[in-house]
Image (cartoon, coloured by chain):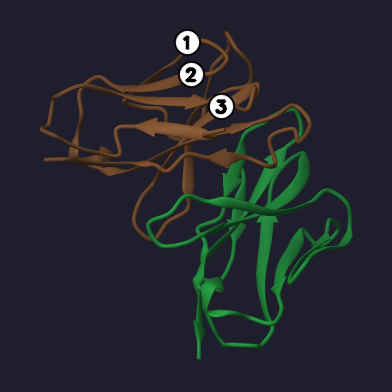
Chain colours: A green, B brown
């Protein structure tokens, strides 16, 4: 089976940097994805890591360490609109389906 | 392009009633998925279709059936609704290039079973 662990809540102030961690246990790991979901909305794709290292997309970066079964999402220059839930997800080799973590609710305060 | 569309947006059922949730995508994606999301939780995969003509069970398939009608459409049927199926249902699709890691989600169907 697969399992993912991420903190349930994180609070930060506008303009700050926040890191959301994700540890996973899975057989045949293929890659780690991150999704954002605003209250009442649909999940939207943020980033994907298949190889070790850091991937940067604007204010958001995602990191993966395959040897540690660990990744994180880094959000810089936080804005109020970044208040949302963030989900990590893994895909096993040979399957197109994702398994999602239970999500981290980020609250950005002024 | 509309992306992924779902109907209906809201639905209230009585225990034992049946209904079909509709999903369509216009991105020419091969793979489509149905998830459910309970309050404060992540998404759990119900069924998916890697390509037209194929379907596979996900993590929580009991009480549901699916039909991949054609490349565009993937429907989810509840034959005899139960209160435990009260949830938000999301349909998603993904293209061949991204292998399923980048999925595009519809707006969701909010289902209440009384």
Q: Which mark is residue A105?
A: none
Query: What chain does mark 1 sit on?
Result: B
Which residue is found at the position 71% from the left and 79% from the top?
A76
What residue is at 86 percent from the left and 58 percent from the top?
A67
Dot 2, how many residues are within 10 Å of its Cα: few (below 14), some (14-19), or many (20+)? some
Mark 3 sits on what residue?
B32
Residue A33 against residue B96 in the figure, above or below: below
Q: Is residue B13 left or right of residue A17?
A: left
Task: Assign a secondary structure to mark 1.
Answer: loop
Residue at point 58%, 40% (across, down) = B104
Front: mark 3 or 2:
2
Q: Is residue A30 above or below residue A103?
A: above
Give yes or no for contact between labels 1 and 2 (Cβ–Cβ under 8 Å).
Answer: yes
Disc number placed over residue B73 in the picture, else none = 2
Q: Which residue is mark 1?
A: B69
Q: Is residue B79 left or right of residue A98?
A: left
Callouts 3 and 2 in the same chain = yes
Q: Are marks 3 and 1 in contact (CB under 8 Å)?
A: no
In the figure, residue A57 lies in which quadrant? bottom right
Q: Could you classify mark 1 by the number of other residues whose Cα lies within 10 Å: few (under 14), some (14-19), or many (20 or more)?
A: few
Q: Are marks 1 and 2 on the same chain?
A: yes
How many marks the image carries: the answer is 3
The foreground one among A26 and A83 is A83
First reached walking from the N terminus: tag 3 or tag 2: 3
Q: Position of residue A109 (x, y in %)?
A: 49, 88
């Amino acid at each position: 089976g697969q399992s993912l662990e991420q903190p349930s809540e994180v609070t930060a102030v506008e303009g700050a940097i926040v890191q959301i961690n994700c540890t996973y246990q899975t057989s045949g790991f293929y890659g780690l994805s991150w999704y954002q979901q605003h209250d009442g909305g649909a999940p939207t794709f943020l980033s994907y890591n298949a190889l070790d290292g850091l991937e940067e997309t604007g204010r958001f970066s995602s990191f993966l360490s395959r040897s540690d079964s660990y990744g994180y999402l880094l959000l810089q220059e936080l804005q109020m609109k970044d208040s949302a839930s963030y989900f990590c997800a893994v895909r096993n080799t040979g399957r197109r389906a994702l398994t999602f973590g239970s999500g981290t609710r980020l609250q950005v305060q002024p | 392009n509309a992306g992924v569309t779902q109907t209906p947006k809201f639905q209230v059922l009585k225990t034992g009633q049946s209904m079909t949730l509709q999903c369509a995508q216009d991105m020419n994606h091969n793979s489509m998925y149905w998830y459910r999301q309970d309050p404060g939780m992540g998404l759990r995969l119900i069924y998916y279709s890697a390509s037209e003509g194929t379907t596979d069970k996900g993590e929580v398939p009991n009480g549901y059936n699916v039909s991949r009608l054609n490349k565009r459409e993937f429907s989810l049927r509840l034959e005899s609704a139960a209160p435990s199926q009260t949830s938000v249902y999301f349909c998603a699709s993904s293209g061949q290039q991204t292998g399923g890691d980048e999925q595009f989600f519809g707006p969701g169907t909010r289902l209440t079973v009384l």
